[in-house]
Image (spheres, grey):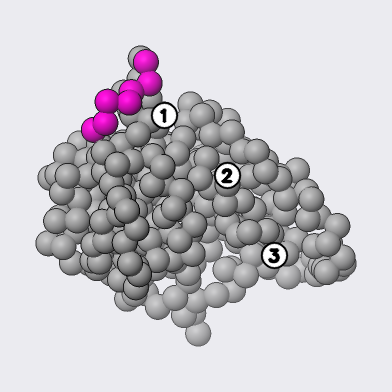
Amino acid sequence: MSSAIRPGSLTPLRFGRLLLTGAAGGLGRELRPRLKAYCETLRLSDIADLGEPAPGEDLRPARLEDAAAIHALLEGVDAVVHLGGYSVEGPWEAILQANIVGLFNLYEAARKQGVRRIVFASSNHVTGFYRQDEVIDSRMPPRPDGLYGVSKAFGENLSRMYFDRHGIETVCLRIGSSYAEPKDRRMLATWLSFDDLERLVVASLTAPQVGHTLIFGISDNATRWYDNRLASHVGYRPQDSSEAFRASREKAQPKLDPTDPTVIYQGGVFVRMGPFD
């Protein structure tokens, strides 16, 4: 690792080699140029086209379900930001291979290669069947809204086991809705700006000790379904808010059906999605 260490801490402010999986996805494309500022080499992986490498980038396409490829991918890596996997509700087999088999491969590779910290992109859909009139924290049990949410709950539990047995620290980011701006009234509660996404990931990488932490990935929104006080040790301080978009989003959706499950539950449209004919 780089020698740029915060006094009294166990983690660097600048890493030698960071790995970003899912680098060709929506959030991966946002984080790719941002994370380069925190490392000497940014290793990028995906199964989609990664384009041409910029200075300081190392492109390593790999399928998560390919254990040998993932073992090689983590060689010489100081920390991992894991965005890779199947990112929406969909067929069980696709979710199984990418999000369950693939995540097991990632943690086994981390154990064997000596990687000590992973930032894991979990999801708000782990708790999607809590109601929108509830405020929840990380002590409350998962209530997944579909197979995708189930796979992320598995990831949270798998990472917990790898911390307890092998000491690999993980911050599980229960990411809300990370877009340039909130798209609808639901996202007034779940929105995570791209700048706050960067702040969240960097805090998760550089906090002195995180153990195994669950944290909800949201900006400083006025409407709140999530309580992050149990993750205050991570040091994430959001600076953006969805409030600036409230008037336009409420004008676009002046009426909501209070009997609609997508309005009742925090998971929104995900509570109706999936292969459940």
The residue wearing badge 3 is: 183
Work out how far the residue at label 1 is from the one at label 3, CA to CA, in angstroms.
31 Å
- Residue farthest to the front? 55
Residue at (58% x, 68% y) in the render: 271
Q: Nearer the viewer, residue 130 or 95?
A: 95
Tell me where residue 101 appears, x and y as whole percent: 25, 63
Hey, what amino acid is under mark 3? Lys
Start and end of the magenta stretch?
A: 1-7
Is 221 displayed left or right of 213 in the figure?
A: right
Work out how far the residue at label 2 is from the one at label 1, CA to CA, in angstroms.
16 Å
The residue wearing badge 1 is: 207
Is residue 79 visible in the rendered structure shown here?
A: no
Magenta-span inclusion, residue 102: no
- Residue farthest to the bottom? 277
Q: Nearer the viewer, residue 118 or 275?
A: 118
**Which SS class for mark 2?**
helix
Tell me where residue 16 appears, x and y as whole percent: 26, 38
Tell me where residue 98 appears, x and y as whole percent: 31, 67
